[in-house]
Amino acid sequence: MDLTVALSTYNRAHLLGRVLEALFAQDYDPQRYEIVLINDGSSDGTHDLIERLRPQAPCRFDVVHQENAGLAKGRNVAVGRAAGEFILFIDDDILATPVLVGEHMAMHGEHPRAIVRGAVLNVESFDELPPPIWSIKNYSGNYFWTSNVSLPRALFDEVGLFNESFSEYGWEDLEIGLRLRHAGVPSLFNPRAVVYHYKPRPTAHNVAGMVRQARAQARTARQFRALNPHWRVKLATGQTTPHVLLHRALRSARYMRTLLTVLGTVRDESAPLSPLQLAAARALAREAYFEELEHATPR
């Protein structure tokens, strides 16, 4: 088996059907790749959806239904069941292009010990997709990003699995990426290995969730730094003195009142936020992140 596509899903039944159908439609020999899907305690009909789609799979399709345990645990279960020489990680809101598996394998053929990162294009709908062409506006400097990344299965024997102590949102993929970097594994980019990432424009209903997620990400950022007190981690997570002082000043100024005033102009809470309202929502979540970072940091 050449490659295992590994993904974990939680309450994304409204997207998962399209995600799986795209993986079933790869321009690659179905005898040479497989899909390992971890249903991480979904309660929205995901189980029934998977069983309905199972007969459509042209390749080996292995499904694990488990209690909710988080992304790190789910990915580790997938690694343990993988039969592929290489493992390709995507998320349950990612729509693969037909060439995805082939493009990852082509680059691994030239660089068998490397991480291969593919292109991620953010879209607001799976029904209206731009051409699958990467451009600089889609750039990400992440060394290892599980929206679209592959690596040799054997590397997990060298650096270990995903750290399951990351039980909340954020950083578990960057943490293992740092271990891979320290092991001297190169990270290469293939702009032809394209996926579409479903990112609809938030509504006012989503703002509270954005803030909660930012606070969870701050807690795991502290955990990340405790595990790896490296300058890259401090910089990536904003745990530096200039970051802390800047955002402390912002939270004590008129800035926060301005953000709340802008969000107070929302008239239809179910409608997508305007560009200005979206910027305010993202800024509010960012300040929640830095407030949480500072709140529980020993003084």
Image (cartoon, grey):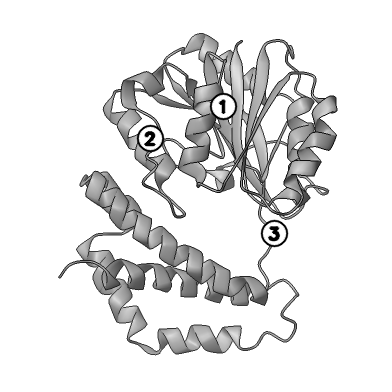
Q: Position of residue 131 (x, y in %)?
A: 75, 39
Q: Position of residue 219 (x, y in %)?
A: 35, 60
Q: Earlier in the sequence, mark 3 or mark 1?
A: 1
Q: Residue at x 59, y 83 (%)?
A: 263
Query: Label 3 sits on what residue type?
Result: Pro
Q: What secondary structure is found at the residue carrying circle 2?
A: helix
Q: Residue at x 50, y 26 (%)?
A: 79
Q: Quadrant of the N terminus?
A: top right
Q: Position of residue 256 (x, y in %)?
A: 43, 84
Q: Residue at x 81, y 49 (%)?
A: 128
Q: Residues within 10 Å of mark 1 (few under 14, many from 20)?
A: many
Q: Are marks 1 and 2 in contact (CB under 8 Å)?
A: no
Q: Are marks 3 and 2 in contact (CB under 8 Å)?
A: no
Distance (Cα) linking label 3 and label 1: 24 Å
Q: Which mark is residue 88?
A: 1
- Residue 140 in sight in this render: no
Q: What secondary structure is found at the residue carrying circle 3?
A: loop
Q: Residues within 10 Å of mark 3 (few under 14, many from 20)?
A: few
Query: Label 2 sits on what residue type?
Result: Gly
Q: Are marks 3 and 1 in contact (CB under 8 Å)?
A: no
Q: What secondary structure is found at the residue carrying circle 1?
A: strand
Q: Which residue is mark 2?
A: 177
Q: Earlier in the sequence, mark 1 or mark 2?
A: 1
Distance (Cα) linking label 1 and label 2: 14 Å
Q: Position of residue 117 (x, y in %)?
A: 51, 30
Q: Which mark is residue 254?
A: none
Query: Label 1 sits on what residue type?
Result: Leu
Q: Which residue is mark 3?
A: 200
Q: Is residue 164 above or below residue 297?
A: above
